[in-house]
Image (cartoon, rainbow, N blue to C red):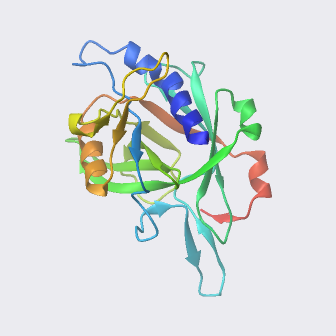
Amino acid sequence: MIVNWIGALLCIALVGASAHATVQDAEPAADDLIHSDLPLFGDDFEQKWPRGFTGGDGGFGCESRVQFGDWRLSSRDSDDQGEATWLAIRNYGVFHCFAAIGTASERDELAQAPFDYGFFIELGTIDSGTEWRELWALQIGSRPRSEYILLERPNQGDGPVEMFTVLQRDCPPQNVRDAGQMSILVTRYCAINSRGELMRLARRMAARPPLGTLHFVANAAAQTDLNAVRE
């Protein structure tokens, strides 16, 4: 399944954040896999992107605050030439609004990458002490599970989003599921099954040093073959 690829590639891209914790960090950066049995944010939740719209002239389609195209996920210690995971984030269509998300270790492999489906979720704003910041999550997958990457960005209004800070994911002890190591296979994950739990975790993680960055690089040439999107 593609989410297994996503989890593995995120670990590869962000391992530098765990291995190179700075002096002021109390502990190495945490990157637990967050898993919910069912999607936490469905059609009843308005602040998820992409989403559908209808116009007064009878037009309709999908709109998104987050740019579609190629994105680069990197650890907080890497530069533009360092190791990274590449995400292809595409619009699915005009009748059914969600993002098609593919991942690869090299950008030129994105065209062949399998896709899973998901949404960017606006969780709300927090006061960092110096500015107001937006908390977000990337929800990936629908059945039989969803997985989450925690994100934040400056509160800069409603313009197109092209940059996120990736937050740490340090699972509360009561939410850890772990059957132990099986050879080189990891079984540990973080079971989060309510919106409230995810929002509380995101707020706690926002107070820690970041895990990495996720930033938009360029529109993909193949995007013109998909259905039109209103930004």
Would residue 71 be found to the left or right of residue 221 on screen?
Answer: left
Q: Quadrant of residue 230?
A: bottom right
Depth check: give the residue in front, 123 or 139.
Answer: 139
Q: Looking at the image, how many numbered discs can be counted on the residues? A: 0
Query: Can see residue 77?
Result: no
Q: Position of residue 7 (x, y in %)?
A: 51, 33
Q: Position of residue 46 (x, y in %)?
A: 42, 68
Would residue 131 be found to the left or right of residue 20 on screen?
Answer: left
The quarter of the picture where the N terminus appears is top right
Query: Can see residue 46?
Result: yes
| Residue depicted at 41% across the width and 20% down the height | 181
Depth check: give the residue in front, 16 or 177.
Answer: 177
Q: Position of residue 141 (x, y in %)?
A: 53, 51
The quarter of the picture where the C terminus appears is bottom right
| Residue depicted at 29% across the width and 32% down the height | 170
Would residue 2 be found to the left or right of residue 139 on screen?
Answer: right
| Residue depicted at 30% across the width and 55% down the height | 194
Depth check: give the residue in front, 80 or 93.
Answer: 93
| Residue depicted at 55% across the width and 36% down the height | 4
Q: Quadrant of residue 32?
A: top left
